[in-house]
Amino acid sequence: MRTEALELIWRTVVAIPRGQIATYGGVARRAGLPGRARMVGHALKVAPATLELPWHRVLGAGGRIAFAQGSRQFAEQRRRLRAEGVEIVRGRVVRSVEPDLDELLWKPK
DNA sequence: TGTATGACCCTGA
DNA sequence: CTCAGGGCCATAC
């Protein structure tokens, strides 16, 4: 049986609007699971492809891509973000406004 | 049953 | 900027 936490996280990720981004910790909080950023990463990893989650909109603290630079996934995430107008420089999202630390849901550009 | 390992985060030095 | 240390917890072995 799938844990309830997984469902909560998936639902939260699906709600991230196109062109906007969130952090692992932020998703955890919005899902009602404060402190469990780690589980968010796990939830994305095991998510069925059929859900078509906008996983690329989830970044590490500070807007950093969690994958290793040079890795296949890093490139894929960067590609998808750029396609939505989110610029990445040195593995990090370029933001023109300070992140809202309470929401952790940013609006780059 | 125990240990190790993550698509993590935060604080402090 | 880096590094260490503590928190978190599902999975894998």
Image: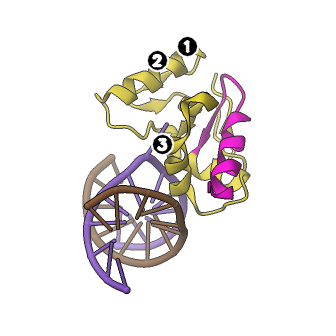
Chain colours: A yellow, B purple, C brown
Q: Is residue A102 left or right of residue B8?
A: right
Residue at the location (72% across, 28% down)?
A17
The kind of residue on which mark 1 rests is Ala
Q: In the rendered structure, find residue A45 and report the number of the disc placed on it.
A: 3
Q: Nearer the viewer, residue B5 or A16?
A: B5
Disc 1 from disc 3: Cα separation: 22 Å
Q: Is residue A66 left or right of residue C7?
A: left
Q: Quadrant of the C terminus of chain A?
A: top right
How many residues crowd mark 3 within 10 Å: few (<14), some (14–19), many (20+)?
few
Above or below for A25 versus A66: below
Mark 1 lies on residue: A83
Q: Is residue A11 left or right of residue C6?
A: right
Mark 2: secondary structure: helix
Question: Quick check: is A18 in the magenta stretch?
Answer: yes
Mark 2 lies on residue: A79
Residue A17 visible? The answer is yes
